[in-house]
Amino acid sequence: MKETKRSLIIMALAWITSLFLVSLVGAYYYTEFQKEKSANTAYVNMYNNLLKNYTSLLQSYTKLLNDYNSLAQSYEAERQNLTYWLQQYESCIMRVNICIDYGNGTILWYNQTIVPLGCNLLQATRMVALVNSTYWPAYRASFVDAINGVWNKGAYYWMWYYWDKDSKTWKYGNCGADLYVLSDGETVRWRYEIPNYP
Amino acid sequence: MKCKRVAVLTVMSAVCVGIQLTPRPPNVEFTSFICFLTGFLFGASFGSLLGALTMFINGFLSPWGFAGIIMPFQMVGMALIGFAGGIYRKLLGEGSSVSKALNFESACLAAFLTLVYDIITNAGYAILFNLEIIIVLIAGVWFSIIHVASNTILFGAAFCRLVKIVGSLAGENL
């Protein structure tokens, strides 16, 4: 084969090769472009959905915030109202501590029990427990028969004590519970026991 | 065949297989160059046989792992390159001297033959994974470009010189 012809054929082959490779590169970039385009469309859709959700969420949040503010305002108004009434109320109440000792190891404390001013022990006890009592006209006093369903039985009776702040000991009450008027901050105790009255 | 030629052919085969099995950057190889050179110096049949044999061994011992179903395609592709070396020598004609102009021609041929090799092996890959061949070619275009470019540079830079060196070793006066 002549040199020129051979060279031409070989150069043509090289040219075809380069053309083929260039077209492959073009196709590669085209497919990449298509992939990116479809991905871009997907991302735009996702973004739009996200934006819609975000807007909806923001609206819900705003509504919730308004509700919360409204509720907070109502709460504040109610609190002020209650504070006012509590202040009014404080002038006619007192707080006492009541203990009920069932004598079997069960001891219940009702601390800071709010009772009206001038309240007696029987009335205060009725506020924290179910009390059965009998009024004795001869003594002009009531006698407690049962507290919370535990009745006086045999030698066992419900006796009451008050806490003597000076001697720091419990002392027996010396009158009927309805005759003993409580004072603010006082501590009293009911005890189911065999009386050991001095 | 003279003893010298047999010895040189043996060395060429050993070098070809050795380099092919050596870890190297993907798609940068010397096998097609050596097969083409072998075909050029020892004839198309030797070139194609060396190409097929090298890729057969490569199919099992390649640092990239077992070639699997692609191996026959690699063997055919490399055999074609070795065969083309022999045909190219015939096209040049008997008694033709090796000039530097051949570097350009061989570089052009290398580009074309490498592309043909890539098309054949990619066809094997497409059959293996049941894909469209054009898809496989497009996906592997950068590997093909590296392969074609490296072979074009290698042939263009070294073909003429190595033909002279190896030819003189084999007792040819080129």
Image (cartoon, grey):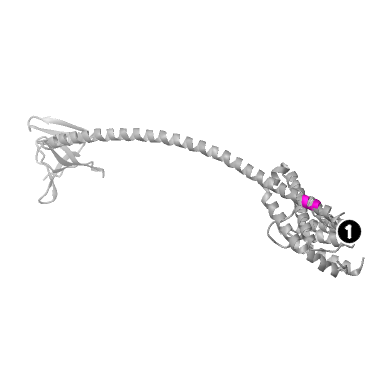
Question: In the image, which residues are magenta?
Answer: A8-12
Q: Nearer the viewer, residue A197 or A31?
A: A31
Give the dominant element type of the magenta stretch: helix, strand or loop.
Answer: helix
- Quadrant of res B90: bottom right
User: Secondary structure beneath disc 1?
Assistant: loop
The percent position of residue A154, horizontal first and vertical second, equals: 20, 37
Q: Can residue B144 be seen in the rendering of this structure? A: yes
Q: Residue furthest front?
A: A4
Q: Residues within 10 Å of mark 1 (few under 14, many from 20)?
A: few
The percent position of residue A23, horizontal first and vertical second, equals: 69, 45
Q: Residue at x 67, y 51 (%)?
A: B142
Q: Nearer the viewer, residue B92 or B35?
A: B92
The percent position of residue A105, horizontal first and vertical second, equals: 26, 45
Q: Nearer the viewer, residue A51 or A60?
A: A51
- Judging by the rendered image, the residue that carries numbered circle 1 is B93
Q: Is residue A177 above or below residue B144?
A: above
Magenta run includes residue A10: yes
Q: Say which quadrant the N terminus of chain A sits in.
A: bottom right
Q: How many marks?
A: 1
Magenta run includes residue B98: no
Q: Residue at x 83, y 63 (%)?
A: B98
Q: Nearer the viewer, residue A71 or A128?
A: A71
Give the letter of the chain under mark 1. B
Q: Residue at x 63, y 45 (%)?
A: A29
- Quadrant of res B63: bottom right
Q: Is residue B125 above or below residue A63?
A: below
Q: Can residue B70 be seen in the rendering of this structure? A: no
Q: Amino acid at mark 1?
A: Gly
- Quadrant of res B61: bottom right
